[in-house]
Amino acid sequence: MSDRKTVMSVNGTEMFSPPSNILIPTRDEGKKPVLDVRGLGIDFGGLRAVDEFTITVSPTEISGLIGPNGAGKTTVFNLLTNVYKPTRGAILLDGHPTAGKSVAQVNRMGIARTFQNIRLFDQMTVLDNVRVGMSNNTRCNFAESFLRLPGYFKAEKRSRERALELLSIFNMESEAYTLAGNLPYGAQRRLEIIRALATEPKVLLLDEPAAGMNPSETHALMESIRQIRDQFGIAIVLIEHDMNLVMGVCEGIAVLNFGKVIAKGTPDQIKNNEAVIEAYLGRQEKKEA
Amino acid sequence: MTLLIQTLIQGISLGSIYALIALGYTMVYGIAKMLNFAHGDVIMVGAYTIYSTILLAHFPGWLGVISAVVFCGVLGVVIEFLAYKPLRGAPSLNVLITAIGVSYLLQNMALLLFGGNQKSMLPDSFDFPDVKIGNTGITVTGEVIFTITLTVVLMVALTLFINKTKMGKAMRAVSEDKDAARLMGINVNRTISVTFAIGSILAAFASLCYGMSYAYIKPTTGSMPGIKAFTAAVFGGIGSIPGAMLGGFVIGILEKLSSAYISTQFTDAIVFGVLIVMLVVRPTGLLGKKIREKV
Amino acid sequence: MKKFLSKINRRDALTLLVLVGIFAFFFIMLQTGAASHQFKNMIIPMTYYILLAISLNLMVGVLGELSLGHAGFMSVGAYTGCFLSVMLVEHFPDLPMFVYLPVAMLCGGLMAALFGVIIGIPALRVKGDYLAIVTLAFCEIIKTVIINLDFLGGAIGFDTDKIVPDRNKALTLLPYAAFAVIVSAILIMNLVRSKHGRAIMAVRDNRIAAEACGINVNFYKVAVFGIAAFFAGVAGVLYGHNDVLLKSSTFDFNMSIEILIMVVLGGMGSNMLGSVIAAVVMTALPEILRDFSDYRMLIYSVMLIVIMLFTSAPALAGIRERLSLNFIKDAVTKRIAAAKAKKANKTKEEQK
Amino acid sequence: MKKIFSLVLAVLMVASCAVAFASCNGGSKALFEKDPEDNVIVKIGGIGPLTGDYASYGNSVKNGAQIAVDMLNESGALKGIKFELLFEDSEGDGTKAVNAFGKLQDDGMNVSLGGVLSGETKNIVASAAESGILVLTPSASAKDAINKDNAFRVCFNDPQQGLYAAEIIKEKGLATKIALFYDNGNDYCKGNADTFKSRAAELGLQIVTEQTYTEGSNTDFSTQITAIKEAGAELVFMPIYYSDAAKFLRQAVDTLDTVFFGVDGLDGLIGECGTEHASDCEDVILLTPYFADSVDPTVKSFVEAYEEKFGATPDQFAADGYDAVLAIAEAIEENGFTPDQLMEITAEDFNKKMVAAMTKITVTGATGVMTWTADGETDKDPNVLQIKGGEYVEYKTADAE
């Protein structure tokens, strides 16, 4: 972690007052945050599922979102991708608000995600799964598809090559023609990430990428996550319960409990944060008593 | 005003029959997650059973009705066992096609056994006296009163069965989550069989009401009420028992109102049009569970 | 040639080959006069049922939305196309068939597509079995409305007698039918193997994930309704030109079910070959069974049930596997996969 | 799994093509075949709905025609010539009827009975135009169902009956305020109702309400009945089939005290109401060329034979089927074909001569004494009948009594 230092960011956006505790890796110094979330909140019935959620993510930052079960982590992802319409607050992606956009439009703006319970296109091949992700970056209109005009062949060739390239980065090119539903669990998780990357996002949201993995797989995943950041130059936000992974790979961490951010900081700061320990382990006094 | 009340009464009566049939659709859907397209034809079988026991074999009326109820109940279980049970776990569309095959089979068997001519289902002794309400000029036929009464009794009985008995609880459990129910020691296969039996028994009663109101039956008698009742089940929210009852009444009343006040020609179009609009507003029917997809 | 073949999917190539084979067979039978009368009369129905099955498969198998109203789209196409043809023939008696028939097909298809889009809009909100009921309801509405339109013949039916001369109607219509079906099949298969086709299948497999991949689910749903309805409409025009009387009551729920049976039996999904073959077989089956006279429909229904049980009962999977020469299938799939992987590796190396 | 099934299907397909192919090479050269007793067999091909919603009509025609064939064969009216009835199911669908027609052609049909319903008959007639085979439909009543030169029919056409009905109502002074009640989705009903309407208007009869239903809603007529009552009609003209009429009357007799008047579709109503609901159809007036209780010897012998063989009273459709076969036999006799001539004649010649004979013959059948015009229509007198005490009697106005 020596390549990174903690600084206070100077935020130029005038709409909002500058946040006090943004962590920016050295390499991102002076760059505007790619994702700027302000006071986000949603109510389900009377329940404030998420409240006052505020984070900023700089362009190549890996950040983690942790918290006990039911804290509202996945709800945050659903809010970020507009699956749920937020009751309060705003999301700015590269300075553009995502309010009122559809899920698909948000993806096209640059937020891609994976799912906690894997959602692949089971009846399609691995290759086609990736190519679905590339749909919006493939230029080929209906007429070209129906009539197989030259544009079709060009687009198909490009998308196939690009998809295979993506697969090969993750050593999955040998599985290109397997049905996605037939892949082993770990490979399915990887494929979801590849598919999300295929949409050429600016921010990648990973929902429990290490769930169900053994320690060695988790370790490989950690490497992959760094590799993705380096190779694609994108920001990654991940939800994870595996603390080794979170502490090992994330540069900034936000801790969520009962829908509220109770702590933000570097892994070291979070490790020693009283509120976090309390949230995870219960109050110290009680434990002693 | 007289016309309106008369029409409403007729609508409730027609709706009762739809509701009885719709219950069969909805219960089977709720538990087996399949559209049992042969259900409409079970009504036809019930009608022919009543016809052959009472008019051909000269059974007393009550015995004829009981034999129809028993026969339909058994038929429901047999159909389930032979045609649907082997397909449990298969794609739902394949089961749907099998159900259609069963529907064709029942129709053509009836055609071979009884011929294509329509038959008068019940003897005259099944006529009930009409009731005139005061001096309002409104007449309610005995059949209508019988149909509505029978339907209400059956619905109360069914509601009690489902909420109070062990088997009813088992049915609800299976419809919520088959696997969890199995883990809790519920015999899922038996529960499904019982559901089919109950649905078919209700269909037998529906066929009695149908025969009393409309007298004539033929091998294709079941298909149109079947489709209408299926529509009613969907209207109310398929899988929901109160929904099927409500849906049946709504469709029946709607049909009668639109043919009385708008146009008999366009009745079907109006009913189906309202159905589409309703489903667009409430995509899971009137009382259907709103399914929130978990992301 | 090899290059051309490499550019189309092997399954599609096989489908096309089978289609061309079927039409060549029909054509030879008709030309040589070898076809029995019964068979001759079945040829055009077989062709439009192929088209209906393919287009319904696009909706049910590829998009994954159950439609019980395909006959409704067909009737819209049939009435529009035939009305146009009758008008053209009446006002321009010298107009040759190769002008007015394709025009009728196109217009019939477009009108059906319009209705497809209209009914596709509720499909955005209504899902699964509820949508099936919406399509069924739509089909019933169309039927009722047409019965009450006097300029379309109402209950008596719309007379299409004069459009096509009676003499050897099958032979007259076959080239148009073959052309329409093959072109439609190519168009549909092309669509399925494009980025749009993949998007449509993604919607089928997992709508939420498809949305998260930036796919406009609503657009594709409506588009597929329109496209499938278009081809159903074209099939309807063929139907109307082959028959001499259009009756809206023909296009009912039962007809939609007939088409659905073909699609399910043929196997749903991106491979259209099954639909083609099932359409031919299911059109022929009741005719072949005529020798059983009174028991014909009984046998038909029993066969339908038995076929469904045999092909989809989970308990019979073992028997199916043994009977079905699965080892050949496995070997073929493996070889294809190996070849593709090899090719993929090669491209990768080239890039390096 | 899909592949396996495709394989099975493919095998089936090849088999089906083979069957279709084989059937066309089997035929012998001569137009006619001979039975073991050296009689020439004339094959009559009928098509109609034997399954599905209209199954009863198809089966009636089939049975009626079978009675005629049996009678002709037994009596040996035509020396050395026997008849055989082939009957195929159309399911009431035009396309399937055409397939059935092809099947009958393959089986060596010599004369066609067309179809039972109008729609299917129109398709069959179009299909038959190519070979010019004589088509004599028993019951297709739509005006243009027999729009080709080689097509004839036994029944009245729809406009004729509507016309007659209006005239008779006027003539006998039955009513001035009339309600129309019919199946709006059925060509027979609609055709009759339309001509009735225009003729009634010309005659100064007032149509107070027009109530319709469709096939899908032909079980519950309560709203229509209420409307007819409200409109104050004196007579209900119902050009519908007896099966629907029985259901309608079942619901209507308690509420309506009007005259019920129908056309030949109502024949069979007595049997339909049966002993259970006999009172429903009491006093109904209908216009029909045929009724089963007629004292006419032709009708009597037909009804007796039919009842003996099928255990049911023959309806209008059965009588039409019976007459159609009789007319075909008559046409053969008119041509004076001998068995030897028939064995040598070409199909084209035979068809031409049979068609030509149709306009020359006079047939006394169950539906009356018939002759045919060149446009295929029959000329016969309708009876105005009334149902009294479960029997048809000739209708007499109150004054006449």
Image (cartoon, helix red, strand yellow):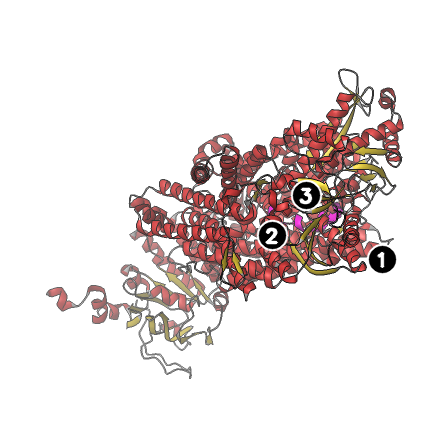
Which residue range is magenta in the image? Answer: C236-254
Q: Nearer the viewer, residue B96 or A165?
A: B96
Q: Is residue A48 above or below residue B10?
A: below
Does residue D11 appear to the left or right of B157 in the view shown?
A: right
SS at mark 1 in the image? helix
SS at mark 3 in the image? strand
Q: Which residue is mark 1?
A: C91
Q: Which residue is mark 3?
A: D387
Does residue C235 appear to the left or right of C92 in the view shown?
A: left
Kindly indicate whether the residues beneath marks 3 and 1 are on one polypeptide chain: no
Q: Which badge, 2 or 3, comes first in the chain's sequence?
A: 2
* Residue D329 picture quarter: top right
Count of all numbered marks drawn on residues in the image = 3
Callout 1 touching callout 2 (CB < 8 Å): no
Query: How many neighbours does mark 1 have within 10 angstroms: few (below 14), some (14-19), or many (20 or more)?
Result: few
The quadrant of the rendering that contains the N terminus of chain B is: bottom right
What is the three-letter code of the residue carrying label 2? Ala
Does residue D245 appear to the left or right of A26 in the view shown?
A: right
The quadrant of the rendering that contains the C terminus of chain B is: bottom left
* Residue B118 picture quarter: top right
Residue C352 showing in the rendered view: no
Q: Which mark is residue D252?
A: 2
Q: Is residue C187 above or below residue D269?
A: below
Q: Is residue B4 above or below residue C266?
A: below
The answer to whether residue C91 is magenta is no
Does residue C94 appear to the left or right of D261 in the view shown?
A: right
Q: Position of residue D344 (x, y in %)?
A: 87, 22
Q: Position of residue C64 (x, y in %)?
A: 53, 52
SS at mark 2 in the image? helix
